[in-house]
Amino acid sequence: MSVGKKSIGYIALAAAVAAVVIAISVALPLGHIAQPPQTQSAVAIQLTDPPQVPAGTQWLNLSYTSITVLYSTSSTSSSSSGQSSVSQTTFTPAAGSATVDLMALENVSQTVGTADVPTGATIYSVTFAVSSAEIDINGQVSQVSLASGTNLLITIAHPEPVQSGSAVLLELNPVIVNTSNGYTLIPSAVGIISSCGSGDSCNIGVRTRITSNQEGELEGAKGSLSANITSFSVSGETTTFSVQVNNTGNTPVVLVAIGLHGSFTVAGAGCPSGNGEGESSQQGMGDGGQCEHPDEVVFVPAVVESSSGSTSITASAMTSAAGSSSSTSSSSSSTSGTRASGCVTAQLRLVYGGEQGDNAENNGEGGGLNITPGQCYVLTFSGIISTGASGHVLIPNTSSGQSFEVHVIASAGAELQLGCSISNSLLMCPLSASSLSIGLDN
C-alpha cells in the first residue's frame, strides 16, 4: 500500500503489452448445468491506491465504458455435485462511461460500480473496458495508451463466495512510462474480497479510508518475484539481454513487462554514434539533431519455447496452475547463455507504445506470461533496440562505471527493481550468484 505518491525518476522507451490476458489460478470442472433460480447479491467494485508516475504528475484520468466480472457458481443438483459453472456479468456506468482520477486514490477506496451476481458466487476477476486515459504533468495534458490494449484486467488473489454487502477491492498500481510515441500505462494490480462495512461506502462515487485490515490483506495477497541478469552483451548495434525471473511467492503471477534502465548511446541518420544521453524531460528524439532519447527500454514476453521445440503463447483466458511447477535453482550464467537448471526459456519482444499504422503489429495480442509458484523463466532479447518512427538505434553503454536497473512488473502487485553496475567489464548485481562478464564486439 502506498503511503505517498510514487514516482519513477526516469523516462521509459517502449512498453506496449497488447491484450494482457491474466491466467486465473483455479481448476474448475466446467459445464453448462441447469440451475434453479438463485438470489442475487449486489457486490461493490472499489478501486484504491495511486499509480507510479513521472515526477510532476498532477492527475491521471482513466475512462471506461463497462466493467465485467468473472465468477463461478456451484451446482445444487445432487447428480452434479462438486461441479461449477463459470459465468460473467457486464454492466455500464449510468452515463455510458465514467472517469476516475487514479492519483486521488491514495489510501482511500472509491466505489465505481456494483455487480449483481448470484449469492454465494465466487468472483475471480474484474475487467475494465478502457476508452481513454490522460495524464497532467506540470500542467501539460497528454494522452496515455494502455499497454494491455483496451482492457484492464485484475484477478482476485484469494477468491471466495460473496453475498450482499461484499466488495471487490482492487489495488491499482500501474507504471506510467514515457515512450518515443507518448505515455503508456503498464498494468500492475491485485484484488481481494472485502466488505462495504457501515455507512454508504457501497454507493457509487463514495470514497472511504482504507482500513488497516484491508491494507494488510492487500499486502499479503501480493505475489513475490526474484530476478537476476543471466547475460548482457553488445555486438555492433545488436544487444543481447537475458534475465531470469523466479516466482518465490505462493500466488501465481503474470509477467507483464521487463524494463532495462540506464545509459544508452544512439546511432542513426543525423545522429553520430555515441552522441546523446537520456533526458527525462523529453518524449523522444530532440530537435536540431541533439539525439535526445529516453533512458529505459521496456520488453514484454513474446513466445515460449517448449521442450519439444515448438512455440506457443502461454497465457490463456483461464488456466489451472496445478502441476506446472519447475525448479527454482539459481546459478549465475555467463554471456555464453548457460542457464539455471529447470528454468523454461522464453523470448522478450521490444514494442512501441502508442504505435499505429505500419507498426501496429508490434502491439498485436501476445498476452502475459503465467508463472506459477516455484517456477522460473529465463527471458531473452537479442536484436536492435530501435526508437520506432525515428529509426534511431539505442546501444547500452557498457563502459566501466555505468549502471543499469532491471524493472520487473507482474500481476498480483509483484514488482521489483534490480540495480546493477559495471566495473572492469563485470556486471555486478546484488541478486546474482556471481558477476557476469560484459560481452563487447564493436
Image: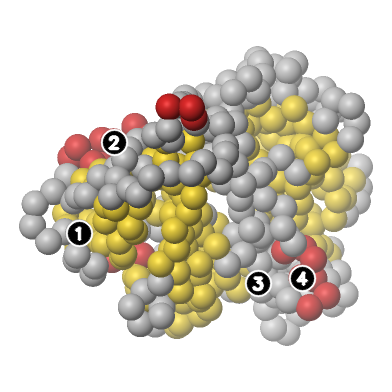
Locate residue 376: give its quadrant. Answer: top right
In percent of width and height, residue 406 lies at 60, 42
Upstream in sequence: badge 4 or badge 1: 1
Q: CA distance from mark 4 to mark 2?
A: 39 Å
Mark 4 Cα shell of 10 Å, populated few (<14), some (14-19), many (≥20): few
Q: Which mark is residue 217?
A: 2
Residue at left 88%, top 75%?
A: 269
* Distance (Cα) linking label 4 and label 1: 40 Å
Where is mark 3, residue-wise?
354
Q: Residue at x 40, y 72 (%)?
A: 92
* Residue 171 pos. (x, y %): 36, 50
User: Given the image, on which type of amino acid does mark 1 rest?
Assistant: Cys
Q: How far across and down, in percent of the image, does residue 124 sit?
A: 45, 43
Apparent side of residue 422 relative to residue 218 in the rendered image (left or right): right
Residue 180 seen in render: yes
Task: Tell me the element at label 3.
Answer: loop
Residue at (67, 50) in percent of width and height: 367
Characterize the local packing of mark 2: few (<14), some (14-19) or many (20 or more) Cα atoms within 10 angstroms.
some
Q: Nearer the viewer, mark 4 or mark 1?
A: 1
Across and down, in percent, residue 98 comes to 37, 76
Q: Is residue 425 visible to the viewer in this orientation of the structure?
A: no
- Identify the residue position indicated by label 1 in the image: 202
Compute the Cα span from label 3 to label 4. 9 Å
> Mark 4 highlights which residue?
360
Q: Along the line of sight, which residue is nearer the eye, 311 or 8?
A: 311
Marks 1, 2: nearer the viewer: 1
Q: Residue at x 33, y 78 (%)?
A: 94
Q: Is residue 84 toward the left or the right of residue 168 in the image?
A: right
From the viewer's perspective, is residue 323 above or below residue 383?
Answer: above
Q: Amino acid at mark 2?
A: Glu
Question: How far is mark 3 from mark 2, CA to CA?
Answer: 35 Å
Do residues under tags 4 and 2 come within 8 Å of each other at their CB atoms?
no
